[in-house]
Image (spheres, rainbow, N blue to C red):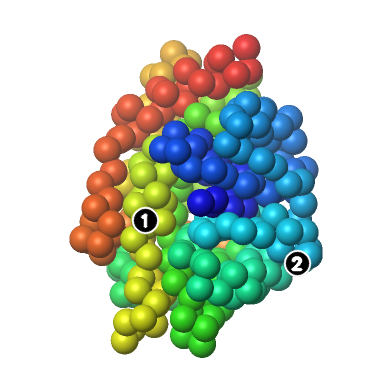
Amino acid sequence: MTVLVTGAAGFIGMNVSLALMARGETVVGIDNLNDYYDVSLKEARLARLTAHNAFSFVRGDIGDADTLAEAGNGVDRIVHLAAQAGVRYSLENPGAYIQANIVGHMNVIELARALGDDLKHLVYASSSSVYGGNTKLPFSVDDQVDNPVSLYAATKKADELMSHAYSSTFRLPQTGLRFFTVYGPWGRPDMSLYIFTRKILAGDPIPVFNHGKMQRDFTYIDDIVAGVLAALDNPPPRDGEDVPHRVYNLGNHSSEPLMRFIGLIEEALGEKAEIDFQPMQPGDVPATYADIEASRRDLGFEPRVPIDEGIPRFVEWYREFHG
């Protein structure tokens, strides 16, 4: 059967779509190719997908329920990755987050409801940002997540709540995945690895927030893709006693100091960074760290790529892609 992938021209969307086709699946992708970041990168990702006969593409916005319904006609699984990403941009353009992450998510779960028993599973992207101001590390899916510190985080928590409600009411099998700082080749230009690499090569200072006192659970794209597919293949039973909705962390289970991260970029580039230390940005948090006990137990999820390997792979791709 066929899998609908929303946000197919995105970083994770492209890689998930390629992995699905590599194992023999047919994929329908939908993406609006918006200009939040360089559209040419999205078009280059899309070109990799359209080279496959098993892929078909609909250019459209998930905020348009009719277009989404047309794209999803006849699919039996959905991987919903389309969203307005980024914590800092939510301070500048909050409406984009409501339209994409709230209205768009509602349209996706309405599509899932319309598919009825033909729908085997809806897997959707949540975010480690839902943990907000939590200080207990590592972050567990059992932790309270009622204190978001950004609008982006609030929309992702709202998505989880809406999905739980639909799973409870309509017995829709759904799984939410809280991604932790995904990086790797073909990644987003608004992420720190891309920004730092570009600026170091250009001889420009790199902005380092909270004066470098930051830690992140950096998760390589291949590990994320393996987790997404494992989740897709393990839907919660719709005929069981429990609500068929689950939430998992997908992270590297390693909280890396930001300055070590920068040091590895310098090493891979063979260049030293000029560092511009800055205060903490609104909506940001000092540390993230994924407890992956549940995803290991239920999905067999096991991250395999540390940043010592992942960063050089990104730098190699960056040099090739940007010449």
Vertical relation: 175 (above or below) 186? below
What is the secondary structure assignment of the residue under circle 2?
Answer: helix
Residue 37 appears left or right of 18: right
Corner quadrant of residue 43: top right
**Residue at mark 1:** 233
Q: What residue is drawn where x is 59% and y is 30%?
A: 52
Please state which of residues 178 and 172 is positioned toward the viewer in this rendering: 172
Q: Earlier in the sequence, mark 2 or mark 1?
A: 2
Vertical relation: 179 (above or below) 256? below
Corner quadrant of residue 288: bottom left
Q: What residue is drawn where x is 57% and y is 45%?
A: 27
Please state which of residues 135 and 277 is positioned toward the viewer in this rendering: 135
- Where residue 123 appears, as percent x and y from the top left, is 48, 61
**Residue at mark 2:** 65
Corner quadrant of residue 318: top right
Determine which of the numbered discs, if any, sits on residue 262 in the image. none
Which amino acid lies under the numbered mark 1 shown in the image of this protein? Asp
Vertical relation: 165 (above or below) 24? below
What is the secondary structure assignment of the residue under circle 1?
Answer: loop
Please state which of residues 281 and 237 is positioned toward the viewer in this rendering: 237
- Where residue 269 appears, as percent x and y from the top left, is 46, 17
Which amino acid lies under the numbered mark 2 shown in the image of this protein? Ala
In space, the residues marked 2 and 1 are separated at their CA atoms by: 26 Å
